[in-house]
Image (cartoon, rainbow, N blue to C red):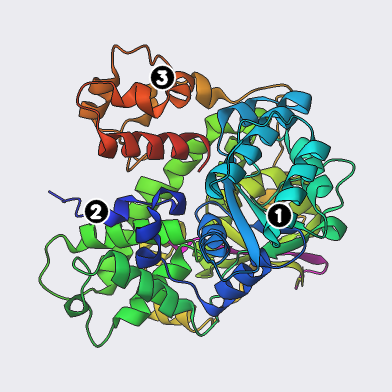
Amino acid sequence: MEQEAYEDNSLVLAAEDFELDEFERYHYFTTQDRRCIAKLRAHGPVLLKGARGCGKSALMIEASRGLYPRDNSSGAIGIYISLRHLGLLQSEGSKYIELFCNLVVSELYSQLDLQGGETDIDSVPELQQLITQIAVDNGKRIVLLFDDAAHIGREASLSDFFDVFRTLSNNLISCKASIYPGVTKFGVRFDVYNDATVVDVNRSETADDFPHLFQEILDRRFSESLRDEKFGRHLPKITVCKLLGMAVLGNMRSFIYSCNELITSLNGHEGVVSISHISRAFKQLSNNYFWPLLEEVEPKLGVYQPMVDPANQIAHILLEKAGEKGERSAIILREIGQRLNKPLEILEYVGFIARKEVSRAMKSRGRGTRYILNLCNLTEYLDQTRINSIITDKFLQFHEESVEFHRGSDLYKLELPEPLEGHDLDILDKPITILRKSNAYPYGLTEYMLSLLAGHNFDDLEALVNASDEDLLAIENIGPQILKRIRSTVNQAIWM
């Protein structure tokens, strides 16, 4: 029977779940990451774009750590603000503005240890005036780092946020925000390419420091389970880390999952990591994590909930043809890509694909978008449904060609359903049992944790989200660690 051999720190997936003193210990930033961080600390508005789990929050937190008050020598104030608040998710218009202003004021006064945080401000001009005055009083410009600004299934309030984002920015206030691929409703007043610099968190596999990044993370999080003796001469640690990083498209959260699956694949085996272990880990990750993600994400897509089925179909079409050819890259004709834009965005969000080139010439004429496919899902479509040393070397050396999808392909024939106009997030109405540890929630709540919550009027997820820490800690046998697990699982269910 397989064992789940997780090291304690591997259960902490989200950067914001780390205590500040632990953050540095478990995170590592490449030269490319440092360039992103520098842009986040500099003047001017910035949008940090990337799929879920790619490291946007870690970059924003690291940016704030190098600014005042965490770094007294800095010439700028850095205020990290998580927008993971249900009220913001459920409101729009003047109500959204009021909640947003209250949140920003509260974080400003709390992080700068100022008095008077109860100041009643409910308009953007008042908020801008207050922030500008704080900047003048401190003799430093202010950087506002808005994390989780965009929720994939709730776009109604996005135009409100970007209107605020644009209005707040001036010579003393620099707004930064993290967004997902495919955010389209920026509002009529926000011109994304003129009103902000877009920074894509897309790690280059060909960069010299790509494998070193993932080896650093492996050493920091799995120093015991995947120690040096577990790697041999034919598959050294640096090569395994590069392969795992490529397999999950450079996504940090998925890499941590892949390490856990590799540990399970070894299952106490005394030998070194082999291609068979990695292949088995890939297939387990595909079955136990990636495919269930489509199931997990569906109830939080709001109006785009009907797009999950076509996203599933697209994934199978891409993987089947790529697997047949032994390739991991696909070019989709621009006309097809534009029509299938939303399901492709969903696949990018859950880490099935990663966009590498917006416009690439096709052999079959025309131009298309080139995507790299997740190697974990692709493994089951390869010859003999496993990777081997030949195909591994091919991928590691980037000796590959792209499969193409043009007007005669199955993608061209695929029909899309209509969005559910006015449809809200189903996830909030789900019973809390949806958080049970499962393939969709590998680090979900145990039966014991759910039993502690039973009988306390937490009938649905919305009630649990709205419960304060004090409410939960008042329940018998719920302490700080179980509370942390509950909050982390709830965040995954709604935002991650």
Marked residue nearer the N-terminal end (1 or 2): 2
| Circle 3 SS class | loop
Marked residue nearer the N-terminal end (2 or 3): 2
> Which x, y percent locates residue 389?
35, 79
Residue range corresponding to the magenta coloring: 363-376
> Which x, y percent locates residue 362?
76, 71
| Circle 1 SS class | helix
The residue singled out by tag 2 in the image is 8
Q: Amino acid at mark 1?
A: Asp
The residue singled out by tag 1 in the image is 137
Q: Amino acid at mark 2?
A: Asp
Residue located 78% across and 25% down the image: 94
**Numbered-mark total:** 3
Question: Which of the two residues, 10 or 365, is positioned nearer the viewer here?
Answer: 10
Q: State whether residue 331 appears in this view.
A: no
Question: Which of the two residues, 482 or 492, is positioned nearer the viewer here?
Answer: 482
Marked residue nearer the N-terminal end (3 or 1): 1
Crowding near the residue tagged with mark 3, few <14, some 14–19, many ≥20 C-alpha atoms within 10 Å: some
Relative vertical location of residue 380 with respect to residue 488 in this rendering, above or below: below
The residue singled out by tag 3 in the image is 431
| Circle 2 SS class | helix
Q: CA distance from mark 2 to mark 3?
A: 28 Å
